Amino acid sequence: MFTWILKQTYNLTSGLSLVSCEFSDAGTDSLDVGLMPHIDNLAQRSDSFWVYIKELPTGTDLSVVFGTNGYAVYLNSDGYLELIVTRTTTSGVWFGTAYPMALGQWYHVVVTIDNSSTTNDPIFYVDGTSRAIYEYATPSGTLSFQTNYIKKFGFQDFASAGLIGAVKDYRIYNRILSAGEVSTLNSEGAGGTGVSSTGLLFQGPCVRTRDLTYYTGHTMTADDRLIDNIYGVTGSATGSPVIVPTDMSLYSLTPASLDTLMYSAFPTNNASLSTTLYIGNFIAWSNTRSLLKFDLSSIPATDVCVSATLSLWLSANSAAIDAVWDFYRVLRNWTSVACWNTYSAGNNWATAGGMGAGDVDGTVIGSSATILANTPADTEIQIALDPTIIQGLWDGTFSNYGFLVKARAEDVTNRAQIYSSDHATVAYRPKLTILTQAP
């Protein structure tokens, strides 16, 4: 299932490209890179990587970034690094005490340790600078539990949780990187070449450059493989990690920060706490439309939007005929009390239902494929939204007042229900997936 090549065959100048791997499920998502015996029980070791944190563990839980039973790099609930190196008598445990890592940004991390003596402490670097650490458990005995154990990014069977976030350009050296080399790696960014490759045993994850388009924004399956730049180690996925190029970032925003439905038969009723939203015409309620808004503040203002995909899940389908949904950018600062007549307390839409001049921009920013009348519940409906418009919602071009969705035809019975952000099943809540590229 896993293979490695015992010679340095691959490199980034001969057909490989580094990619970022994103994990969204702390209990399943992982990237398995096999046994990798050439990194077992190293007398000296340096791990260098870039990490983006979307969610930290809670309480005493630890999130695994990379490792195995014998050696693993973690994040704790305070955003500090933690290193555990297993030995036969007592495992060494160290964690950071300064410069915690926050959500929503990339950090460069280097962990170095000289395992030739149990009195040696590791050095933790974050963003090019050595940070203070605390030795929680002093190691004793010989290194153990590294040989014949599979190495993974993300979730591990021996840990409470895996990383919720992304990792890129993970390197392992069989030597101690100097402070100057760490500074160079940090300033160059992912894929930098200013540090000698002497002692470099692993660099990844990578894909073949010819396959980069296929892998951009791709959700991995068990049939996909990622490659190591040095020895050609191959890795396979568990769960649903997503791959993007290293100069891109993927934002999976769920649930919507605010959503509600509006129906013309009850023009003053508010339904912001409903677990379902309605789209289309239904005899008893006439026309129904829905409003959704997502918090885009975590996206750097200068990032360029490559793609934006809205995912909605059907909860029921009352349609007698097929339907198409159209999405519009809202121009009013609507609130949780929005209804068919008003967008906020005491403020009327220009036209009841929110489709008047000044209510929405009249340009459709995305449309669903035809939704068949017999489409079953729990089906995911994906809508590609205009990247230029979506970028404008975070770069200051437009105010982010979210979207209005309506059925294109509202004179026929075509109403469908979708799960809202208040639904108990997290996986069925609205999700906006945005792929961006740094300028």
Image (cartoon, grey):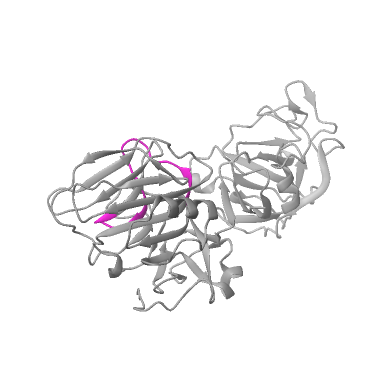
Q: Position of residue 98 (x, y in %)?
A: 39, 35
- Residue 184 makes an appearance in the image: yes
Side of 350 relative to 346 (left or right): right
Residue at 48% from the left image edge and 40% from the top image edge: 424
Q: Is residue 114 left or right of residue 163?
A: left
| Magenta residues, start to end | 51-71
Q: Residue at x 39, y 67 (%)?
A: 198
- Report the front residue among 434 and 405: 434
Q: Nearer the viewer, residue 186 or 345?
A: 186
Left or right of 77 in this view: 304: right
In the displayed structure image, the side of residue 126 where residue 418 appears, left or right:
right
- Which residue is located at x 85 percent, y 35 percent? 358
User: 121 above or below 267?
Assistant: below
Count of all numbered marks drawn on residues in the image: 0
Q: Is residue 110 magenta?
A: no
* Residue 19 position in % (x across, y down): 52, 62
Q: Which residue appears farthest toward the top when viewing the image?
A: 346
In x, y percent, where is residue 300? Answer: 63, 44
| In the depicted structure, whether residue 183 falls above or below residue 39 | above
- Residue 325 appears in view: no
Of all residues shown, which one is farthest toward the right? 357
381 above or below 346? below
Q: Nearer the viewer, residue 437 or 63?
A: 437
Placement of the N terminus among the 4 image quadrants: bottom left
Q: Residue 419, image x and y in percent?
A: 58, 44
Res 371 → quadrant:
bottom right
